């Protein structure tokens, strides 16, 4: 029964996945689409370090002051963008 179900469902899954992935695997033929893809790649290359893209010194200064304000307001030690690390200790169970 399970084998029969797998045999009938596998071709459907393959057709669906190929149908979804086909546009992504093709090269952009429309010049507007190609320009859009180029801009996305350029933006991802500029923002690789996690910094703001094309930021002015004033904007960087404002960002730093906001992060400092958040650190003080919520008493955060370290980088406020880091995900908090939780430490759970197993309770001692007596036998």
Image (tube, rainbow, N blue to C red):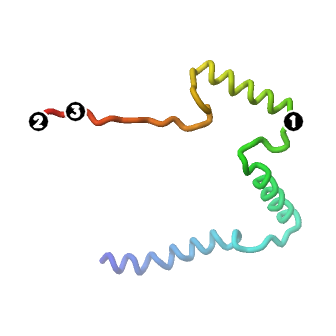
* Lateral position of residue 16 relative to residue 89, left or right: right
Element under label 1? loop
From the image, tell me which residue sits under label 1.
56
Q: Are marks 1 and 2 in contact (CB under 8 Å)?
A: no
* Lateral position of residue 31 relative to residue 82, left or right: right
Residue located 71% across and 70% down the image: 23
Q: CA distance from mark 1 to mark 2?
A: 64 Å
Question: Quadrant location of the N terminus?
Answer: bottom left
The 10 Å Cα crowd at callout 1, few under 14, some 14 to 19, many 20 or more, is few
Residue located 80% across and 61% down the image: 37
From the image, tell me which residue sits under label 2.
95
Q: CA distance from mark 3 to mark 2?
A: 10 Å
Q: CA distance from mark 1 to mark 3?
A: 55 Å
Residue located 63% across and 69% down the image: 20
Element under label 3? loop
* Lateral position of residue 6 relative to residue 20, left or right: left
From the image, tell me which residue sits under label 3.
92
**The image quarter in which residue 63 lies:** top right
Residue extending furthest toward the left: 95
**The image quarter in which residue 19 lies:** bottom right
* Residue 41, placed above or below residue 92: below
- Along the line of sight, which residue is nearer the eye, 79 or 41? 79
Element under label 2? loop
- Along the line of sight, which residue is nearer the eye, 75 or 10? 75
């Amino acid at each position: 029964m399970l084998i029969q179900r797998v045999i009938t469902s596998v071709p459907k899954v393959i057709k669906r996945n190929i149908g979804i992935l086909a546009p992504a695997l093709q090269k952009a033929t429309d010049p507007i689409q190609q320009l859009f893809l180029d801009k996305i790649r350029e933006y991802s290359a500029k923002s690789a370090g996690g910094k703001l893209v094309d930021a002015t010194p004033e904007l960087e200064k404002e960002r730093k002051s906001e992060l400092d304000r958040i650190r003080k307001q919520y008493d955060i030690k370290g980088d406020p963008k880091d995900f908090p690390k939780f430490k759970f200790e197993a309770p001692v169970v007596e036998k």
